[in-house]
Image (spheres, helix red, strand yellow):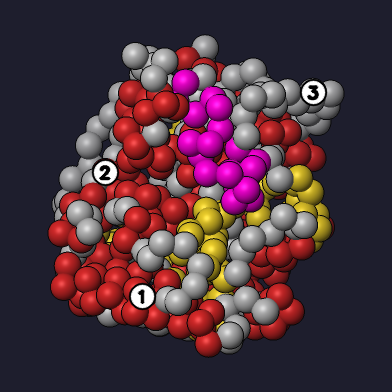
Amino acid sequence: MKYLAEFSDPDLAKRLVDQIHATVTKPWAMMEVCGGQTHTIVRHGIDQLLPDGVEMIHGPGCPVCVTPLEIIDKALEIAAQPGVIFCSFGDMLRVPGSERDLFRIKSEGGDVRVVYSPLDALKIAKDNPDRQVVFFGIGFETTAPPNAMTVYQAKQQNIPNFSLLVSHVKVPPAIEAIMQSPDCRVQAFLAAGHVCSVMGTSEYPELAAKYKVPIVVTGFEPLDILAGILRTVVQLERGEHYVENAYKRAVTDEGNTTAQAMLSDVFETTDRSWRGIGMIPQSGWQLSERYREYDAEYRFQVRDIKTEESTVCRAGEVLQGHIKPHECEAFGTLCTPRNPLGATMVSSEGACAAYYLYRRLQAPEAVSSVG
Amino acid sequence: MCLAVPGRVVEIRVEDDTRMGKVDFGGVIKDVCLAYLPDLQVGEYTIVHVGFALQRLDEESAMQSLELYKSLGALEEEFGDQWGIAAQQAGERRPPGTEYRKETAE
């Protein structure tokens, strides 16, 4: 238990780990959906504190990783256009498109800007009325309300030179897709806490019942994750499957209803393609008809995008939990954070990046040729 | 990006008909949209994601989380020098025009 000393409350961590060991009598496989949780698990070695046979399968909840290549390529095309100011969160800068990334566009003279909040991009649009200002709106249910508010504001304040390149995705349809996959090994889910801070928990009981899987809403800190795992294995051992909220300090059953109302005004549900995974029906949001004039995909007619994904990258299998990052032949050799073949090696929420950062030395065969 | 950081509301104002405020994240103060928590008051703690307050949080949990994020360097990643981080990862020089000015508490 070499990692326990690093927990904020090592005694509580030890008690949780002991209880997990005392509860488990057989092997179980559970998926943490959120990339932020994957990062915590790998960084703190939580999976290595668990009883033998209890496996954490890392899920697709890394927004940067699942943004489809076609949208990335569109973003790059738009960002390279003269007169455009392209605004993004910092973690999109090095996500590989078919040929380049936003960092490269900026180095070559494109006007790419990193913002902390989408409202910062709207301010840039107000300050530069003669330029087209585009914000790259990606992410899950947590990031969608900020982007929705920003488009709403653009319309209210009549800022015609602002637009949003949208690629929002939702967690429940991804859980559904994972459970319907023929090779699915997942027996339970840790649901993403901050997604539920916004959406509440009402979407999950139906999934827990339909697929007979425990779903435990969990936070992002090491102790939160241990507590979530404990509640999950208790349900699994008892043969139960229901939704439990282990992150009550930040999640209420109803979620943030003000944010939900804004979401249903600004966005409408659509089919969405997930990078490495493929199309998942009704799994995303696009701007609703009322706000379509602010949709960068309509404003900038980017056609003839020919996407070209790396042929060796197995990010899709990683994102679906079929393989662990170090089981990919390119891990740590052809593919590193410096030269990423897939988005999972770039984002701090990507499983490959987390394994590279914290587990590389434990997979020496995978890095032997790096030198 | 998916990180949501707790902070303490230190100021509330209305700007362009929108509820905005300043939130203190353990010394880093940021402009935050408070429209999704219409009854949040000065002195209360909230979870903030990409400049938006999304849920209330009690003080004790907020302080614990902030301390943890600080010790892990997560606040640097959230609020810090994004071009610098990207340039370092890429092993390249930062692109022209991306020089970093550190924000400090007011």
Q: Which stretch did the figure color magenta?
A: A315-333
Residue underneath mark 3: A306
**The residue marked by circle 1 belongs to what chain?**
A
| The image quarter in which residue A215 lies | bottom right
Residue A366 appears anywhere in the view: yes
Mark 2 vs mark 1: give the one in front.
1
Residue A120 appears anywhere in the view: no
Q: CA distance from mark 2 to mark 1?
A: 33 Å
Task: Judge from the rendering whether residue A129 lies leftward or rightward of residue A299; answer left or right.
Answer: left
x and y percentages locating residue A367 in the rendered image: 40, 24
Task: Judge from the rendering whether residue A131 lies leftward or rightward of residue B42; answer left or right.
Answer: right
| The image quarter in which residue B61 lies | bottom left
Q: Residues within 10 Å of mark 3 (few under 14, many from 20)?
A: few
Residue underneath mark 2: B76
Q: Mark 3 vs mark 1: tell me if same chain.
A: yes
Task: Judge from the rendering whether residue A121 lies leftward or rightward of residue A305; answer left or right.
Answer: left
Badge 1 amino acid:
Ile
User: In this picture, is A147 found above or below A120?
Assistant: below
Say which mark, if any, is on residue A20.
1
Q: Mark 2 vs mark 1: tell me if same chain.
A: no
Q: Nearer the viewer, residue A257 or B3?
A: B3
Q: In the image, what residue occupies the spot 28% across and 79% down? A: B58
Say which mark, if any, is on residue A106.
none
**The residue marked by circle 3 belongs to what chain?**
A
Circle 3/circle 1 CB separation < 8 Å: no
Helix, strand or loop at disc 1?
helix
Helix, strand or loop at disc 3?
loop
Q: Nearer the viewer, residue A97 or B54?
A: A97
Q: In the image, what residue occupies the spot 54% across and 25% down? A: A330
